[in-house]
């Protein structure tokens, strides 16, 4: 057996196991070694409920009964309830908030595994929102007794649990890995981390770390192993990002030095004065433009902090400039530099287009829009105050000959058929929603590499920004324009929901619109989670229609809906054809609907603070007073305190840091899209580790920019480059 031996060659596998492994992407022995446990349980027991303490995270096997779909007595929250009984006859109460249909999914008397944390209240032991599994996290071959000889009272023994997949069990992983270790395969792997680094940071070697990870004898061993892999992952991401940055900056860029007076005049037309943060961002960017090497910068700012204004001013500086030292420039009629702006959805692209048209209305500057469903150009020949639809071919021709200096669009912008005359500046909105490949596509050079500005409203902690945006310089817009009415935020625990709906009725009566956000459902299987989310939005919409808002036009939005339809729904919301949008957190990103004044967030305790803040951002830009209600049934004092921080806090970055502190990296909003593994995310909690990995990467590249002395590392960096991160 070698690391490259295929699993079906090395082990006898059933068809079910084969397809489960394929589904998990596990083909070789090496794959299996690097398939990390998602957690460890201190016990795995049957018939020992009586010995377990509240607060313990356990997997139990037993029988469910008394299944019931019901509603909270006062809260009216829909829920499922059941009683769970293990072999010893001890009973605990199971409850699933907001998931009444679970009562229908399970059968009375059915035997299954439940996984979760034990809680205790006046009625005894219980488990809230447990994960259930019929096949079991572990195979149920042994009739009685624990599957492992571990004694759960001995807290020094840990059982690894792997991300579950139908057809393959954690038990299988455990025994198979034992065989692999016995065959010494893990010792044949070359350690990609130089031994000097391991020593310096006191990290275990690759082969020890693999054993400690899959079969820890002590908690500290598993932790040391995870620390190593966390460091390794961040180190390689840093290497890849820093190297990309170095490579990009080897290109020439247009050097742009607009007259200060012109820029000031452009700004003076705005109906507002810039915030200090905006001014300094503009200053920084214009300074980068002068250097003749391409800028790579991230502009982070909450929704409404005025990023678009910064984009417009800096675009102005670009499109009013002519290329210098370029081929006989005088020969071209349309010689100005060009700007491309890419947004993740059609609605957002259109909003940017409309914003830019307003900013450039008074200038002889044409603005183009290109999306999957059509193209537009401003100004129209007939009406110089309006934009007009034009053919794609015509638009592309004018972009290619430089006549249209500003082009705004969706992914359509990076198709092969789109070419620019003098692309000098690219702006990407909500960049994490694009892959690195798409980003590279847009900033591909045609003679000169364009300056790059990424914009993001997703508040993330510094450690995460340093990691995933390791190739970008960071500018924060951490100040809101003056005079904007803050959203009135209220946390409502248990009772008081009537008042929330009263307010909602008043707003609807005044012609405003409303968002209702359904609680997040945690479910390891993404596909299953989406189905559950869909069900919960549907149920909530039906309930609202029946019990609260019989006359309202209610629509639902969740991640099972196709992007095209999603856009249509948002478009109808924008057009005022929907009164109440019942949604999952998919409404998080971007679309500005000024007439939506109220957002009600159910199950607020299930969201991270940063995510709640972003959801609240949906009603931030209303010209009317807006409201955010955070509803929670939680009885925990800490949870209540946590939710209440939103009432006072204003800044998304602070909240992201707080999330990290209080809830850990796993709870960072949008975690899945960062392309960092769970183990890697553990490093994000640790600023020292991130900084160390960053420094080591910088040092290594400084000494050896092409990584010639580290072929193993160079190869790994190459594969990382191929991978698209931010999708
Ligand atoms: P973002 O893209 O960061 O969400 P925008 O640039 O779209 O924010 O600005 C949001 C709104 O605030 C727009 O209507 C814009 O005209 C306005 N705005 C931008 N900057 C300021 C400012 N300094 N003072 C007042 N209003 C501003
Ligand atoms: Mg914006």
Image (cartoon, helix red, strand yellow):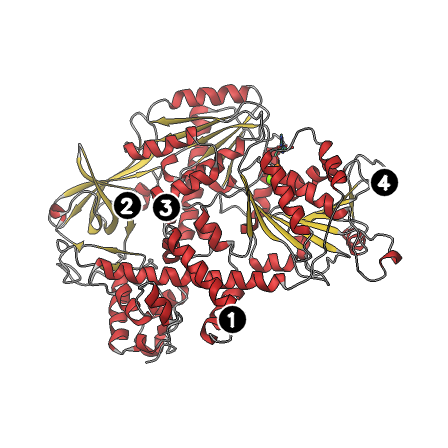
Residue 372 in sight from this viewpoint: no
Disc 4 residue lies near ligand 1 with CB under 8 A:
no
Q: Identify which residue, 301 or 726, lies in the foreground.
A: 301
Q: Which quarter of the figure is the N terminus placed in?
A: bottom left
Tag on residue 522? 3
> In terms of sequence position, does the residue under pointer 4 or pointer 1 come before the other?
4
18 horizontally vs 516: left or right? left
**Residue 542 picture location, percent across and down:** 45, 32
Give the distance between the C-alpha atoms of the residues marked 4 and 2, in whole angstroms.
63 Å
Q: Residues within 10 Å of mark 1 (few under 14, many from 20)?
A: few
Give the spatial CA distance, label 4 vs label 1.
56 Å
x and y percentages locating residue 575 in the rendered image? 63, 32
Q: Quick one: label 4 or label 2, which is nearer the N terminus?
A: 2
Tell me the crowding category of disc 2: few under 14, some 14 to 19, or many 20 or more residues within 10 angstroms, Cα based: some
Q: For this rendering, which residue is in front, 244 or 357?
A: 244
- Residue 239 locus on image (x, y percent): 49, 63
Indicate whether 351 appears above or below 544: below
Residue drawn at x 32%, y 27% as measured from the top left:
494
- The residue lying toward the viewer, choosing from 199 and 421, is 199
Q: Mark 1 points at which residue?
A: 704
Which labelled disc corresponds to residue 381? Answer: 4
Q: Nearer the viewer, mark 1 or mark 2?
A: 1
Number of residues whose C-alpha sits closer than 10 Å to that of mark 3, classed few (under 14), some (14–19) or many (20 or more) = some
User: How far is the residue under mark 3 from the one under mark 4?
Assistant: 54 Å
Mark 4 vs mark 2, foreground winner is 4
Q: Which of marks 1 and 3 is in front?
A: 1
Q: Distance between the residues labelled 3 and 2?
A: 10 Å
Q: Quadrant of residue 159?
A: bottom left
Label 4, secondary structure: give it: loop
Ligand 2 falls in which quarter? Answer: top right
Disc on the earlier residue, 3 or 4: 4
Q: Earlier in the sequence, mark 1 or mark 3?
A: 3
């Amino acid at each position: 057996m070698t690391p490259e031996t295929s699993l079906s060659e090395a082990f006898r596998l059933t068809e079910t196991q084969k397809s489960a492994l394929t589904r998990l992407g596990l083909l070789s022995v090496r794959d299996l070694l690097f398939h990390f446990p998602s957690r460890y349980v201190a016990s795995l027991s049957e018939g020992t409920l009586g010995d377990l303490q509240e607060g313990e995270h356990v997997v139990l096997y037993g029988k469910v009964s008394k299944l019931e779909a019901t509603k909270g007595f006062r809260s009216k929250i829909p829920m499922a309830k059941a009683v769970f009984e293990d072999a010893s006859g001890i009973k605990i109460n199971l409850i699933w908030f907001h998931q009444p249909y679970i009562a229908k999914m399970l059968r009375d008397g059915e035997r299954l595994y439940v996984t979760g944390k034990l809680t205790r209240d006046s009625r005894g032991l219980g488990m809230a929102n447990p994960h259930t599994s019929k096949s079991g996290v572990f195979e149920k071959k042994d009739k009685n007794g624990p599957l492992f000889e571990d004694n759960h009272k001995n807290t020094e023994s840990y059982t690894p649990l792997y991300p579950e997949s139908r057809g393959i069990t954690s038990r299988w992983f455990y025994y198979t890995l034992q065989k692999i270790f016995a065959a010494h395969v893990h010792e044949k792997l070359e350690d990609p981390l130089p031994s000097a680094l391991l020593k310096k940071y006191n990290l275990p070697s690759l082969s020890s770390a693999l054993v400690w990870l899959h079969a820890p004898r002590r908690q500290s061993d598993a932790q040391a192993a995870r620390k190593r892999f966390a460091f390794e992952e961040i180190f390689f991401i840093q290497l890849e990002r820093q190297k990309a940055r170095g490579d990009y900056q080897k290109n020439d860029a247009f050097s742009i030095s607009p007259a200060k007076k012109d820029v000031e005049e452009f700004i003076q037309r705005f109906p507002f004065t810039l915030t200090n943060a905006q001014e300094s961002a503009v200053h920084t960017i214009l300074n980068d433009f002068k250097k003749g090497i391409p800028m790579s910068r991230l502009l982070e700012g909450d929704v409404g902090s005025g990023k678009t204004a910064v984009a417009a001013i800096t675009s102005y500086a670009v499109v009013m400039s002519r290329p210098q030292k370029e081929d006989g420039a005088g020969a071209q009629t349309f010689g100005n530099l060009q700007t491309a702006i890419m947004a993740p959805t059609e609605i957002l692209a259109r909003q940017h287009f409309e914003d830019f048209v307003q900013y450039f209305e008074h200038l002889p500057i044409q603005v183009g829009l290109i999306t999957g469903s059509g193209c537009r150009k401003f100004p129209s020949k007939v009406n110089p105050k309006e934009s007009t639809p034009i053919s794609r071919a015509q638009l592309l021709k004018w972009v290619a000959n430089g006549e249209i200096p500003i082009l705004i669009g969706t992914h359509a912008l990076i198709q092969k058929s789109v070419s620019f005359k003098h692309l000098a500046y690219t702006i990407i909105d909500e960049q994490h929603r694009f892959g690195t490949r798409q980003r590279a596509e847009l900033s591909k050079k045609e003679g000169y590499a364009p300056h790059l500005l990424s914009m993001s409203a997703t508040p993330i902690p510094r450690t995460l920004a340093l990691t995933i945006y390791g190739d970008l310089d960071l500018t924060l817009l951490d100040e809101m324009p003056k005079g904007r009415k803050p959203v009135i935020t209220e946390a409502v625990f248990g009772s008081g929901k009537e008042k929330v709906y009263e307010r909602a009725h008043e707003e609807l009566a005044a012609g405003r619109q409303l968002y209702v956000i359904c609680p997040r459902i945690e479910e390891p299987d993404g596909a299953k989670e989406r189905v559950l989310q869909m069900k919960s939005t549907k149920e909530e919409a039906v309930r609202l229609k029946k019990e609260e808002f019989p006359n309202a036009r209610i629509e639902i939005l969740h991640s099972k809906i196709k992007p095209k339809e999603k856009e249509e729904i948002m478009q109808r919301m924008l057009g005022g054809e929907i009164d109440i949008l019942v949604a999952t957190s998919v409404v998080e990103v971007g679309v500005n609907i000024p007439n939506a004044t109220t957002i009600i967030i159910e199950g607020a305790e299930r969201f991270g603070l940063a995510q709640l803040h972003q959801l609240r951002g949906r009603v931030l830009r209303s010209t009317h007073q807006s409201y955010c209600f955070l509803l929670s049934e939680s009885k925990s004092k800490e949870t209540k305190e946590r939710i209440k921080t939103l009432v006072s806090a204003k800044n998304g970055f602070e909240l992201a840091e707080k999330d990290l502190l209080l809830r850990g990296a796993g709870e960072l909003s949008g975690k899945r899209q960062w392309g960092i593994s769970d183990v890697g995310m553990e490093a994000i909690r640790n600023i020292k580790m991130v900084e160390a990995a960053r420094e080591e990467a910088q040092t290594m590249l400084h000494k050896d920019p092409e990584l010639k002395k580290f072929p193993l590392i160079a190869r790994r960096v190459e594969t990382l480059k191929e991978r698209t991160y931010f999708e």
